């Protein structure tokens, strides 16, 4: 069965971008593929969380994964730091990753622009750690949002380079995946760009948000003063609200507001109210599950232990093969 790997950094709660870009596919893929999903806690160290924060956010991330419908008996779900084989492969891949190509990575350039006081080596080598996450299980499909496309391209480069260097076929080529269509970019509520946890208060709707918080955030979303000419093109902030609506509302609702926009009779207040209620209805059952699971200590540790064990079995095989190919002693 084809192998699938994907992960999410535990830096804040899951938002609708994470859900529609990645987790929705995890839930579906677990029934069709051999899936490994993890909480990317090594990756999150680039922002230097305190131990308490890290512990809390890993736990929260696991609760949210499970609340979305990821079933630990159907797939392998684990914490990245429970799989030190990943760190070993990361070290080995770093030997053949060039500083120039890492520096050209868009996400690195963005990070150093936003945080010039924290340009650490972990940020620079973020794509090699990601490649290690994927290649340690020899995954070929990686369900991710559009923002991860370049990282996947780099993973392919590192995999092919390793195979070429050692004249082997150890690593298959991993590809970004979204069921039958292009990769998703869920917009935020601030009028531009994507929904993200670091894009500022109010931009993201989290699965753990209460109905009141969701309503408040949606009602404050950026719009414009409204269309004046029939058929006029939508400005980006308004188009973003329609994109969000397409994810959580029925097609009838979307069509209704689209036609209102087209004939200039739309009232953004009504659009936002409807969008907020549809988001609340969509999130409510997940939100309830998050609270139930997050308070179940026994379940959380059982799932973590079970995941670590299954992930080891897979990673051990790859790392032994890699050590042998490189010329190290194998146990
Ligand atoms: P992270 O934690 O930023 O995001 C997790 C997943 O959510 C997707 N995503 C979005 N998709 C659509 N629209 C959005 N607005 C949006 N925001 C986030 C991301 O594309 C991602 O799929 N580097 C990764 C974590 C990672 C990983 C890996 C992923 C580490 N190792 C190996 C796959 C394979 C990251 O920071 O994702």
Image (cartoon, grey):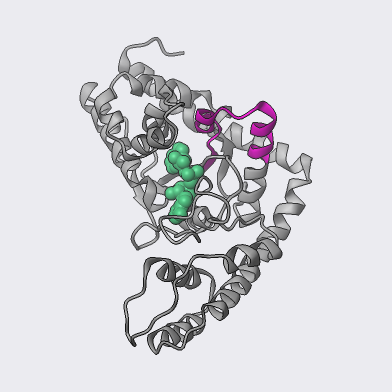
Q: Residue at x 56, y 77 (%)?
A: 269
Residue range in magenta is 37-59
Is there any visible trace of residue 85 in the rendered image?
A: yes
Is there any visible trace of residue 89 in the rendered image?
A: no
Front position in the image: 65 or 252: 252
Image location (x, y in percent) of residue 66: 64, 51
Image location (x, y in percent) of residue 82: 58, 28
Compared with 17, 223 (above or below) is below
Q: Residue at x 64, y 65 (%)?
A: 216
Compared with 112, 243 (above or below) is below
Q: How many numbered badges does the structure rendering display? A: 0
Compared with 275, 285 (above or below) is above
Look at the magenta stretch and give its main secondary structure: helix
In the displayed structure image, the side of residue 289 where residue 22 appears, left or right: left
In the displayed structure image, the side of residue 189 where residue 110 appears, left or right: left
Is residue 81 magenta-colored? no
* Residue 202 position by quadrant: bottom right
Image location (x, y in percent) of residue 221: 53, 65
Image location (x, y in percent) of residue 58: 63, 38
Front position in the image: 266 or 28: 266
Q: Residue at x 67, y 40 (%)?
A: 59
In the displayed structure image, the side of residue 50 where residue 162 appears, left or right: left
Compared with 262, 218 (above or below) is above
Q: List the single residue furthest toward the top.
A: 329
* Residue 280 position by quadrant: bottom right
* Residue 100 position by quadrant: top left
Q: Residue at x 42, y 29 (%)?
A: 116
């Amino acid at each position: 069965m084809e192998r699938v790997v994907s992960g999410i950094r535990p830096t804040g709660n899951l938002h609708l971008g994470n859900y529609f870009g990645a987790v929705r596919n995890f839930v579906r893929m677990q029934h069709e593929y051999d899936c490994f999903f993890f909480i990317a806690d090594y990756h999150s160290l680039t922002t230097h969380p305190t131990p308490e924060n890290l512990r809390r956010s890993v736990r929260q991330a696991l609760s949210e994964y499970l609340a979305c419908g990821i079933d630990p008996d159907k797939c392998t779900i684990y914490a990245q730091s429970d799989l030190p084989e990943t760190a070993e492969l990361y070290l080995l891949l770093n030997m053949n990753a060039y500083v120039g190509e890492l520096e050209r990575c868009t996400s690195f350039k963005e990070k150093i622009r936003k945080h010039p006081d924290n340009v650490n080596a972990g940020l620079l080598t973020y794509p090699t750690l990601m490649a290690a996450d994927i290649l340690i299980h020899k995954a070929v499909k990686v369900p991710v949002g559009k923002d991860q496309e370049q990282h996947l391209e780099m993973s392919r480069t590192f995999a092919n380079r390793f195979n070429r260097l050692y004249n082997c076929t150890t690593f298959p080529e991993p590809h970004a995946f979204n069921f039958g269509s292009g990769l998703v970019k869920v917009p935020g509520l601030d009028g531009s760009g994507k929904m993200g946890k670091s894009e500022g208060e109010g931009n993201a709707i989290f699965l753990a948000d209460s109905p009141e918080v969701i309503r408040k955030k949606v009602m404050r979303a950026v719009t414009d003063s409204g269309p004046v000419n029939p058929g006029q093109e939508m400005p980006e902030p308004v188009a973003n609200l329609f994109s969000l609506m397409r994810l959580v509302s029925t097609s009838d609702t979307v069509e209704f507001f689209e036609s209102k926009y087209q004939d200039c009779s739309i009232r953004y207040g009504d659009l936002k109210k409807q969008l907020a209620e549809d988001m609340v209805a969509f999130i409510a059952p997940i939100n309830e599950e998050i609270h139930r699971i997050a308070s179940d200590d026994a379940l959380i540790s059982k799932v973590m232990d079970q995941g670590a064990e299954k992930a080891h079995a897979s990673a051990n095989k790859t790392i032994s093969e890699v050590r042998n190919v490189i010329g190290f002693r194998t146990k």
